[in-house]
Amino acid sequence: MKDLFEEAPQNLSLYHLIALLYFDFLEQVKKGAKYEQLCPFLISSKKKCLERPMIEKRVLKQLTTNLFSFEQREEEIEVTSEEKRAEITLRIKESEIYRGEVFLHDISPYLMDEELRVEDLLVILFMDFLQRIKEKGNSSQAMKAILLNFEDYF
């Protein structure tokens, strides 16, 4: 962004991007985003980004000497790709964290017994952003929106 736009701030960092995604998401919720549409996205993204892949296996279990039964068991799939993980510490105003917690409490009836934390929401938003960039490419419109939001929030 610094190469394309002269007005790009020099201190723009990964922290700022993640915070902007979070603030923008909360603003969209405030403007009236439908929980019925958001929750399936959040649930599927949580399973894709945050949970280890599982596989169900049917195992034959011996009940007595002559009686056997099938039992369903979930086992973690060993991930062979070179998946990299990073831990980032963010400083966000307490009021903004509370806004996220209130949102998560409000959508809890729509989450079908799934549990989400603000930290999970941050990961989902960032990973979704990266996926969209991979699919659609890095557009100048997205960069301009980031720069405008940066000026508003920081």
Image (cartoon, rainbow, N blue to C red):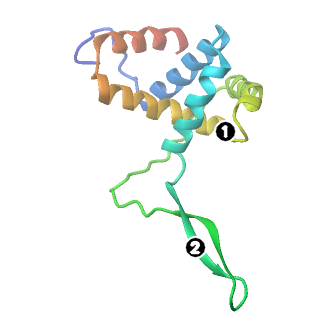
Dot 1, crowdedness within 10 Å: few (<14), some or many (≥20)?
some
**Depth check, front residue: 92 or 41:** 41
Q: Residue 59 bears which disc, if any? A: 2
Residue 116 - label: 1
The residue at the point 43 percent across, 50 percent down is 85
Q: Position of residue 29 (x, y in %)?
A: 64, 15
Observer-side mark, 2 or 1, equals: 2
Quick check: 94 above or below 113? above
Is 28 left or right of 115, judged from the image as shown?
Answer: left
Disc 2 + disc 1, Cβ < 8 Å: no
Kindly state the secondary structure of the residue where label 2 is placed.
strand
- On-image quarter of the N terminus: top left
| Number of marks in picture | 2
Where 5 sits versus 114, above or below?
Answer: above
For mark 2, does the 10 Å Cα neighbourhood hold few (<14), some (14 to 19), or many (20 or more) residues? Answer: few
Q: Quadrant of residue 117?
A: top right
* N-terminal label among 2 and 1: 2
Which of these two is toward me, 94 or 31?
31
Amino acid at pointer 2: Val
Q: Residue at x 69, y 34 (%)?
A: 111
Residue positioned 61% across, 66% down in the render = 73
Residue 141 lies in what quarter of the image?
A: top left
Q: Position of residue 37 (x, y in %)?
A: 60, 21
- Please say if 26 is above or below 76: above
Vertical placement of 77 versus 15: above or below?
Answer: below
Whole-Å distance between the Cαs marked 2 and 1?
31 Å
